[in-house]
Amino acid sequence: MRRQAILADSRLERRLRRLEGNRDLDPSGFPPHCPEWLAFWQRQFHLYVNGEEHVTLTLEGACAVMQAIPDDDEAPMQLS
């Protein structure tokens, strides 16, 4: 019985170490919020909008893309 508990603990520890090693990377493969990460998600969002094949968007990636788009009130006004 004790041996089974030890084996279960070691399996769990291995799984946790593997998950912790990947926790900072999403499908982009870049650390969150670096320029390459944002460029990756902007490209994936563009593909999604155009109905092309893309990776599944993450909430964090989609939010970053939306925040990178300037608001209309920040755009220069054109006088007619």
Image (spheres, helix red, strand yellow):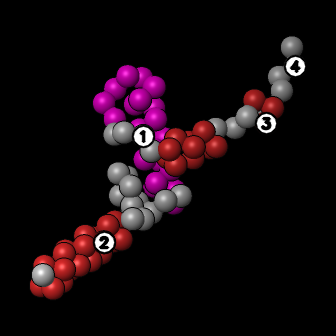
Question: For mark 3, what is the residue?
Answer: 74
Q: Which of the two marks, 2 or 3, is nearer to us in this view?
A: 2
Q: Residue at x 57, y 47 (%)?
A: 64
- CA–CA distance in space, label 1 to label 4: 38 Å
Q: Residue at x 35, y 51 (%)?
A: 27
Q: Which mark is residue 79?
A: 4
Q: Nearer the viewer, residue 3 or 50?
A: 3
Q: Position of residue 45 (x, y in %)?
A: 46, 35
- Stretch of the chain drawn in magenta: 34-54
Q: Is residue 53 magenta?
A: yes
Question: For mark 2, what is the residue?
Answer: 16
- CA–CA distance in space, label 4 to label 2: 59 Å
Q: Which of the two marks, 1 or 4, is nearer to us in this view?
A: 1
Q: Secondary structure at mark 2?
A: helix
Mark 3 is surrounded, within 10 Å at the Cα level, by few (under 14), some (14 to 19) or many (20 or more) other residues, namely few
Q: Residue at x 45, y 32 (%)?
A: 46
Q: Which mark is residue 57?
A: 1
Q: Nearer the viewer, residue 27 or 43?
A: 27
Q: Which of the two marks, 2 or 1, is nearer to us in this view?
A: 2
Q: Nearer the viewer, residue 77 or 72?
A: 72
Q: Residue at x 19, y 80 (%)?
A: 5
In the rendered view, does 30 fall on the left or right side of 3? Answer: right
Mark found first going from the N terminus, 2 or 1: 2
Mark 4 is surrounded, within 10 Å at the Cα level, by few (under 14), some (14 to 19) or many (20 or more) other residues, namely few
Q: Would you say residue 24 is visible in this rendering?
A: yes
Residue type marked 1:
Leu
Q: Which of the two marks, 4 or 2, is nearer to us in this view?
A: 2
Q: Please determine whether, in this image, residue 62 is positioned above or below residue 5.
A: above
